[in-house]
């Protein structure tokens, strides 16, 4: 009987689905309080991304597509966001939202999928690096609930989604270092998916690729072939991401866009030895693992192969870069633009998580005496298992504890419409719209949530002058967005009514009760290629406000302003290149897998 049970356990452990089973169970454990409490999680960036996803969902639901204009999210202002920020994930999330009955179910499925994507990516990295199956599962669990990925779960920081996808790039990087040749197709697809997901994370992935590729180039005998292969991969990646860089060049090249806010002192946004950093950036047990790996490699340097040395040194370097111990004040002084476009050095920690965690797995696999502290007489294998159990239990417990605070906040909101919104730069219209937060969170009308909780952020809005780290504060972007694109909706009798048309354009109607034509500030924005048609005639704004809202001279009576975005032949060609490239690369990949 005992042997029978042992055989069943052995079959389950050795089955292909066992890693998936563990990953799902751990994910459900982390989300247990959210599930039991039936609670939505609202973090700092939740509503920003909810607006993006809602816009994509409505496009898919209605068939009224517009790649550039946001016609449903962000107060239906026609601004550009998704085209410049992870369009691939925006439409995937939109499809998921479309089939979800409400925001609560959507978010639950979404965060679970992100954790699973992260865990399988890390599991793949471990297997490529010959980490044993058991330790590969443990390391993958550590990564999926680690601070980098879990930031998407508890605060909806999109770097968490980038962190979930990043391990797939490291599969290609690992193969390059081990085989000393570039997996052209794999590297291209991984980098392209990362670019389509989160540009900042893809740039950080490239920075980690450079030193590892350099080591591989030094070691390989066929250096010329490796260089040529890397150029091939770069060209394929450009073709696969033409829609992203094409949109960036077009919009940034023809407009003054308002950037993200500048960080005055970047060092303060890295890992600091304080409570916040230990809760949100690198938890204590994670830091213990990092320090252990680096110390282990330095102590046993002469006995280790170049692969483990490379991972540990590059991971250790980026761990240093993610902290306030790195001289960010000097670098920020030399390159002030970093404060706007990079903002938070803590983002580099994701590279340390991948490289040092996989190093941890390699060490545990190859050294049976690892984690045994002989000087404390902890020499048996039980101490290794005890440490790993403590590590995982602490990580899971800490994440549940952090989520409890989010749950408590949302509980207060759904119990009272008068509860102060706990999210920065968010204006509540729930009472004005005669709804409740409970209806917004669990109702079938998904647009109600983003209408009732208006996220007033200036990202990618067109400015009337160049805005940078020097004049950002004086420009008052957040206050202007509130006044000109949110509050302005309610400043005239009857308000501005907005309708999305079959061709993807946006029509705004309002009434001028006066007997003469008057200037009206309409809460929609115009970029260089935005086309405006007033009452059937092409028009140009009398002027634009600091955040791009148009001022139009309106006739007495009803007025109708159509807002569309012109896509020229160059951008259409880049769209076609992207689609064709993906079809070709997928066919080639399938042929290689099957044959």
Image (tube, helix red, strand yellow):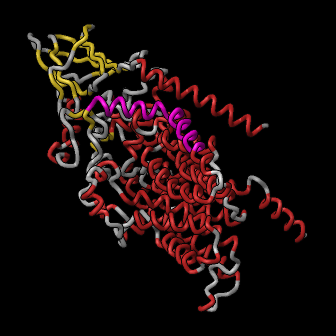
Asked whether residue 167 is in view, the answer is yes
Position of the N terminus, as image quadrant, is bottom right
Position of the C terminus, as image quadrant, is top right
Helix, strand or loop for the magenta stretch, by majority: helix
Asked whether residue 96 is in view, the answer is no
Q: Residue at x 59, y 91 (%)?
A: 376
Res 504 → quadrant: top left
Relative vertical location of residue 118 with respect to residue 465 in this rendering, above or below: below
**Residue situated in front as seen by the camera: 139 or 171:** 171
Instruction: Give the residue furthest to the top.
Output: 536
Q: Is residue 478 left or right of residue 69?
A: left
Q: Is residue 236 magenta?
A: yes
Count of numbered circles in the view: 0
Q: Is residue 51 left or right of residue 542?
A: right
Where's residue 374, x and y in %?
63, 89
Q: Residue at x 28, y 42 (%)?
A: 259
Where's residue 96, x and y in %?
54, 37
Relative vertical location of residue 128 with respect to residue 54 in this rendering, above or below: below
Where's residue 541, x and y in %?
19, 20
Relative vertical location of residue 370 with respect to residue 238 in this rendering, above or below: below
Look at the image and give the residue range highlighted in magenta: 228-255
Q: Residue at x 20, y 16 (%)?
A: 511
Instruction: Give the residue furthest to the left.
Output: 516
Relative vertical location of residue 208 with respect to residue 258 in this rendering, above or below: below
Where's residue 28, x and y in %?
59, 56
Q: Is residue 71 magenta?
A: no
**Residue situated in front as seen by the camera: 488 or 117:** 117
Q: Residue at x 14, y 10 (%)?
A: 556
Q: Is residue 425 left or right of residue 225?
A: left
**Residue situated in front as seen by the camera: 96 or 542:** 542
């Amino acid at each position: 009987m005992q042997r029978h049970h042992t055989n069943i356990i052995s079959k389950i452990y050795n089955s292909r689905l066992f890693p998936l089973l563990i990953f799902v169970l751990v994910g459900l454990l982390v989300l247990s309080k959210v599930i039991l409490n039936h609670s939505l999680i609202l973090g700092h960036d939740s509503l920003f991304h909810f607006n993006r996803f809602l816009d994509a969902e409505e496009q898919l639901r209605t068939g009224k597509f517009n790649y550039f204009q946001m016609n449903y999210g962000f107060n239906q202002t026609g601004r550009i966001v998704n085209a410049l920020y992870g369009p691939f994930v925006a439409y995937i999330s939109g499809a998921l939202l479309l089939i979800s009955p409400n925001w609560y179910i959507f978010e639950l499925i979404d965060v679970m999928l992100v954790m699973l994507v992260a865990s399988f990516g890390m599991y793949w990295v471990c297997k490529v690096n010959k980490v044993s199956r058991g330790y590969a599962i443990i390391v993958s669990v550590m990564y999926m609930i680690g601070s980098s990925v879990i930031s998407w779960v508890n605060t909806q920081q999109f770097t968490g989604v980038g962190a979930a996808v990043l391990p797939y790039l490291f599969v290609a990087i690992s193969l390059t270092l081990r085989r000393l040749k570039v997996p052209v197709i794999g590297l291209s697809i991984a980098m392209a998916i990362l670019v389509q997901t989160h540009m900042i994370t893809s740039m950080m992935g490239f920075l980690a690729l450079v030193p590892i590729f350099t080591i591989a180039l030094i070691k390989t005998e066929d250096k010329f072939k490796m260089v040529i292969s890397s150029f091939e991969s770069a060209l394929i990646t450009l073709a696969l991401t033409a829609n992203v860089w094409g949109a960036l060049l077009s919009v940034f090249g023809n407009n003054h866009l308002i950037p993200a806010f500048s960080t005055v002192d970047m060092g303060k946004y890295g890992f600091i030895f304080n409570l916040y950093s230990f809760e949100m950036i690198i938890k204590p047990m994670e830091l213990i693992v990092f320090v252990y790996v680096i110390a282990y490699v330095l102590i046993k340097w002469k006995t280790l192969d170049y692969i483990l040395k490379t991972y540990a040194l590059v991971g250790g370097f980026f761990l240093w870069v993610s902290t306030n111990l790195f001289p960010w004040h000097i670098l920020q002084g030399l390159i002030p633009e970093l404060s706007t476009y990079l903002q938070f050095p803590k983002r580099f920690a994701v590279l340390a998580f991948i490289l040092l965690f996989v190093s941890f797995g390699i060490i545990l696999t190859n050294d049976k005496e690892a984690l045994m502290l002989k000087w404390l007489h902890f020499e048996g294998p039980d101490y290794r298992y005890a440490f790993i159990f403590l590590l995982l239990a602490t990580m899971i417990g800490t994440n549940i504890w952090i989520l409890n605070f989010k749950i408590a906040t949302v509980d207060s909101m759904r119990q009272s419409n008068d509860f102060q919104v706990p999210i920065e730069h968010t204006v509540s219209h729930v009472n004005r719209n005669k709804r409740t937060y409970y209806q917004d969170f669990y109702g079938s009308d998904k647009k109600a949530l983003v209408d009732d909780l208006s996220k007033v952020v200036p990202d990618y809005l067109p400015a009337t002058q160049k805005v940078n780290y020097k004049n950002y504060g004086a420009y008052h972007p957040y206050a202007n967005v509130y006044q000109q694109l949110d509050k302005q909706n309610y400043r005239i009798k009857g308000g501005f009514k907005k309708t999305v048309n079959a061709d993807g354009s946006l029509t705004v109607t309002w009434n001028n009760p006066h007997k003469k034509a008057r200037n009206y500030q309409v809460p929609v924005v115009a970029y260089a290629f935005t086309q405006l048609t007033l009452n059937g005639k092409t028009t140009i704004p009398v002027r634009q406000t600091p955040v791009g809202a148009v001022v139009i001279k309106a006739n007495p009576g009803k007025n109708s302003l159509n807002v569309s975005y012109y896509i020229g032949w160059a951008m259409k060609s880049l769209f076609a290149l992207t689609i064709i490239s993906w079809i070709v690369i997928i066919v080639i990949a399938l042929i290689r897998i099957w044959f």
